[in-house]
Amino acid sequence: MTILRRWWTALALLALNTLAVFAAANLIALGVLAWRGGAARPGPVPPSFIAGAIEKAFPSLDAAERADLVRESSMSFIYEPFTQFRERPCHGRFVNVETAGYRRSADQGPWPPDPANRNVFLFGSSTTFNYGAPATETIASHLQRQLADGPRPVRVYNFGRGGYYSSQELTLFERLLTAGFVPDDAVFVDGGSDFETASRSSIPPASSLRGRGNATG
């Protein structure tokens, strides 16, 4: 019995020490990730492609402005629960991503959204985020200008994210609703990422998003 008790005590101490080391390692990893702002991975659009597209699309920008736009558009992703990833928050001359998860547009509305405005949440992938486009030329900014003739001020929030497909966008929309951020309209711009995802998987993506309220796709 004495030998068994010694073995049992040794095994229990070994298990306890192993758990303590594991917990300490996880705490250190969490601290490092918090200090670095999360584990980042490269964005979806190569800088070389962005540079060529910017020169053709915005010839009025000078070399320094194009360089700034390329640099700001070459961003990285960080982890986000449920949706898996998102663009890292940043603030620049042409590209600004808020901690709330949306890219700033021209005449951006406040966060949380002001209920006095007609608030529109725009969802999509990199095309909607508009990699390589200054804030004044994004789909969100053009949409806001097109809707400006209504009785209430319109404020569009660009929740487009690189590499997203419709299932992720729906998850993001549900998380915003659960947090109490309910827009007047929700617009989904989808196609490319869904087809690409479907071609790599036997499970079809949720390409049709229909629900309560004003939602279009």
Image (cartoon, rainbow, N blue to C red):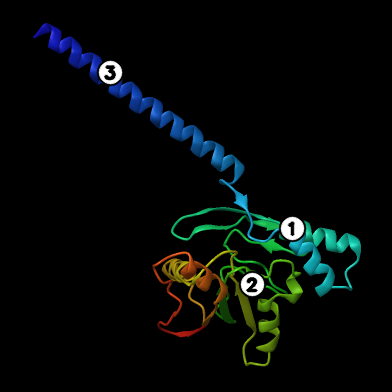
For this rendering, which residue is in front, 24 or 48?
48
**Of the numbered discs in the image, which one, if any, rests on residue 47?**
1
Where, quadrant-wise, is the N terminus in this rendering? top left
Asked which quadrant contains residue 4, the reply is top left
Q: Residue at x 62, y 55 (%)?
A: 88
Disc 3: CA contacts within 10 A as few (<14), some (14-19) or many (>=20): few
Q: Is residue 93 visible?
A: no
Q: Is residue 90 visible?
A: yes
For this rendering, which residue is in front, 172 or 194?
194
Q: Is residue 182 above or below residue 69?
A: below
Instruction: Name the kind of residue labelled 1 in the image.
Output: Pro
Q: Is residue 164 above or below residue 30?
A: below
Q: Residue at x 89, y 60 (%)?
A: 64
Q: Residue at x 24, y 20 (%)?
A: 12
Asked which quadrant contains residue 175, the reply is bottom left
Instruction: Report which residue position mark 3 lands on.
Output: 13
Instruction: Report which residue position mark 2 lands on.
Output: 127
> In this image, 10 relative to 101: left or right?
left
Disc 1: CA contacts within 10 A as few (<14), some (14-19) or many (>=20): some
Where residue 193 appears, x then y in whole percent? Answer: 54, 70
Q: Earlier in the sequence, mark 2 or mark 1?
A: 1
What secondary structure is found at the residue carrying circle 2?
Answer: helix
